[in-house]
Each structure stands twice: as structure tokens, then as C-alpha cells.
Image (spheres, coloured by chain):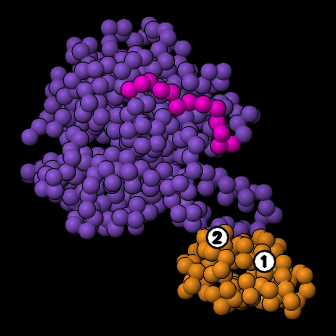
Chain colours: A purple, B orange
Amino acid sequence: MNLKRVVVTGLGALTPIGKTVPEFWEGLKNGVSGAAPITRFDASLFKTQFACEVKDFDAEQYLDRKEARKMDPFTQYAMIAADEAILDSGLDLEKINLLRAGVIWGSGIGGLKTFQDEVSDFVRGDGTPRFNPFFIPKMIADISTGFISIKYGFKGPNFVTVSACASGTNALIDAFNYIRLGKADVFISGGSEAAVTEAGIGGFNAMKALSQRNDAPETASRPFDKDRDGFVLGEGAGAIILEEYEHAKARGAKIYAELVGGGMTADAHHITAPHPDGEGASNVMQLALEDAGLKPEDIDYINVHGTSTPLGDVSEVKAIQKVFGDHAYKLNISSTKSMTGHLLGAAGAIEAIASILAVQNGIVPPTINHFTDDENLDVHLNLTFNKAQKREVRAALSNTFGFGGHNCSIIFKKIAG
Amino acid sequence: MHFFAECLNKTDHNMSEIAQKVKAIIVDKLGVEESEVTPEASFTNDLGADSLDTVELIMEFEKEFNISIPDDQAEQIGTVGQAISYLEANVK
């Protein structure tokens, strides 16, 4: 069967280090940290009192007040990023076949704030079951794609992928596959998350997953550093317009890069701990390379999952060395989570954007906050510490792994012809 | 404004307060202008409410006035005037 080619024709980002794609890219190139004390709620009793929030966010700057009120923040973020991406793509919604235009989005949790607030109200009451009629439609993760489809009239495939921190990449791979198979022409894909709430911070704290470096939040997300102590929770959204190549060419679209391959595997090992040898991670990178028809030597940059947890960072690097062999020393490797924090279900989306822009601009964003080498990691690897590096990036691979043992890898390549 | 002024004139202070609160809730929840909230205005036909908005409005009235409106009676409340009349008759 002849598979179609899939290209990236639009980008949107609402992140802790920039509320548009150009701002986000400036932040990435300059090594800006998005971490700061939590403003969304009083975190004084929590072990972790900082996060990577979207700064100075006011939904009503972007959305009608009545509309915004019916959306959990994760959906508001989705709408804002999707809008930037659609505008950026230059798609004329009057001219495309809307039945062949879909929305596949990723969210690890969905409307956590809505869930927390509604259930708290009930528990504080006298037992009378009074729930807001918007409770369920605000909370469910798939409402994000519902709202996006209503706004743009996209009537093709429409759903949300849920695989924790791999959700965004899962969404992109699904959209990629539908287009490749000829089932659709264009997708708004990506992911969003808004888990900086009492339940989110408290829940991840209980797992001992979050950094507790309260005295210096901006240096807390330090993937590969010897003294890393957990991830920094982030929030926001990334949106990517994926389009069938001939469809994009016919309308003279600007093309950022080609999406050439994706892989999906499971660790089948433990609910939260990664496989010690990074088996699921090496399998998934191998699958993505095979899917793309590329050799390890064709990859110049790996945007790692690299969340800044003691175990995860080491097993991922082991997996890279296993798959890439000697070429691992010629690659640039970086964790942009050092700047953005961990956006959970949106991580794959914004990291795909970072990878696409690295390919397009020939710049690899850094892993900031490197102070001390970790003896468990090979010092001869180029982990792009502290400063962005200029280099040709023919193809970039982005990894995301999720609680539950989900692994996804995706590869973007410089567009040829 | 005429309608609320009327409420003020013909009723005691308590009733005008109900009308004002009802109006404020409708403006807030449905995102409409105060001037649109006339007694005849239908939540669905005139003020852009869908079925979920209507349920939410009833819930807000229950919360604000600390009463419980049974479903069969809630279904009879379709306009601003009907809401105010119901609440004036039932709020103690």
C-alpha cells in the first residue's frame, strides 16, 4: 500500500516560557526557565511550592467570557494554541473538505481543576447531590477536541488520546497514521494540560515525583544533573497542523518539516518506574526509525523525555546508547523540560514543536541547569548543557514516556522536494 | 429597567431584592447584557441558553435563595418573569 506523506504546516504554543510560538522559541534558544512560585493557589502547606505556570494568563483575553466559563483551563489552553496554529497554517476553511479534517488531541488528565472544585463543593455540603450540569462536560478530556471541532467545523476523526505523559505524542502519531492511510487531509493535533492545582501538586508530591527545591525553583528542573530531585510540573498547550503533502503543496502552504515516523510501545514492567535498562524506550526509538525508513546515523537531535527524575533520565540515556551506538556521541541530546517543566499530556506536543523548530532553524535548544556531572551518565555524550548549539538538524527524534509504561517516539525531518 | 422599577414600586423591599439577584445571576451565567434581561425574555429563545445552561440557572437560584426547586416545577420556569414569580412565591 502506498502511504501518503505528512507535513507540518502550522504551529501554536501556550507555554510557561512563551504564550505564542515565536515567544516559546525565543525562550528555548535563550535557555529561559519557566519555574516560579505557584500563584494558582496557596501552596504553603505543600512539599513543592513552585511550578511552571503559564504566566499572567487571562482566558478572557482570548475567549468570550461565556464560552471560557464552560471550559476547564486545559480546554482554554487547547483552544488558544489551536487558534494560533490554524492562523499560522493559512488554511482556508471555506475551501477544504471539512469531512476530511479532524482533531486528535492529547491530555493526560483532563479537567482536574473542575473535578477538584466540584467534588470539594459536594463534600463541603450537607450531602445533597448538587452538581453543576457543566461538571462532566468540562472535566472529560475529549471535550477539548469537541470544542475545537465546533469552532472550525472539522467533521473528520475526533478524539483524545490518554497515555499520561505520552498523550501528546500518541495524538500526533494517530493523526499522522490517518493521513498516511488516506483517511483524512488535515488534522489539528497536539495536547494540553492544566494540572497545577492542589490535587495535581499534592498527588504528584505523594508519589515523590516532584522536585522540592523550593529555595531555587528556576534551577529545579535539571535533567541529567547529579543533584536532580524530580520533575517540575508545567502546564499549557501545543498545537500542530498536520497535512497531507500534496494537499499542502496544492495550496502553496508554508511547510515546516515532514513527519516521517512514529513508534509506540509499552514497558509491561511497572505502573510508574521505568524499565531499568530502558527496554521499552529502546524498542520505541528503534520502531520509530524503522517506521521512518531511517538509520540511526540520519538523526542529528534527540529531544528526550528527560524529566529530571533520578531513575528516568539514566534509563533513557542507556536506551539511546543501545539504539544509536557510536552515533550517540555525534548527536545533540537535550531536555527542553529543563526550561518548560513537565507539561504531562502536552509535553509531546510542545516538544514536537521544539524538534520541528530545531530542524527548521538549525539550532538545538539546551538542557539548562547543569551544575554537576552524574557519574551514571557517559560524559562524552553531547547533552547540550546550558547553551543552545547551532548545527544542521537533518532529522530530530522526540521521546515521551508516560506513567503506565507508555512510550512514544516521533521523527521530524527536513523537507526534501 | 422598567420591569425592575415596577417590582420595586408594587412590592416590598424583599421582592425587589429577589428580582435584582435573579437578574445578576442571569447576566453572569448567560453572559448577556442587563438590558436584555426583560420579564418576557425566554432563557432559550432570547438569551441564548442551552438545556445545560437552564439547569445551571435553576441550581444557582437554589443556591442563592437556599431553596430546593423540584424538577417538575423547574421545567415550568422558562422566562425571567417566571423565575422571579416562582421565587417571590416560594422564598421565605
Q: Compute the Cα span from label 2 to label 1.
A: 14 Å
Task: Name which residue type carries label 2.
Answer: Lys
Q: Nearer the viewer, residue A327 or A44?
A: A44
User: Magenta-highlighted stretch: main secondary structure?
Assistant: loop
Q: Is residue A154 above or below residue A29?
A: below
Q: Which residues are magenta?
A: A29-41
Residue that carries the numbered disc 1 in the rendered image: B20
In which quadrant will I find the N terminus of chain B? bottom right
Question: What amino acid does circle 1 point to?
Answer: Gln
Q: Which residue is mark 2?
A: B29
| Residue at x 77% of width, y 70% of height | B63
Confirm whether the magenta stretch covers residue B39. no
Quadrant containing the C terminus of chain B is bottom right
Cβ–Cβ under 8 Å for marks 2 and 1: no
Mark sitting earlier along the chain (2/1): 1
Residue A111: x %, y % from top left: 55, 53
Q: How many marks?
A: 2
Q: On the rendered structure, is A293 left or right of B66?
A: left
Residue at point 58%, 43% (across, down): A56
Residue at 51% over, 27% down: A33
Whether residue B64 is visible, yes or no, is: yes
Q: Is residue A233 visible?
A: no
Residue A138 figure quarter: bottom right
Looking at the image, is A306 positioned above or below residue A373? Answer: below
User: Residue A189, how many percent across, how many down?
Assistant: 34, 51
Residue at (22, 59) in percent of width and height = A184
- Helix, strand or loop at mark 1: helix
Q: Position of residue A191 (x, y in %)?
A: 41, 47
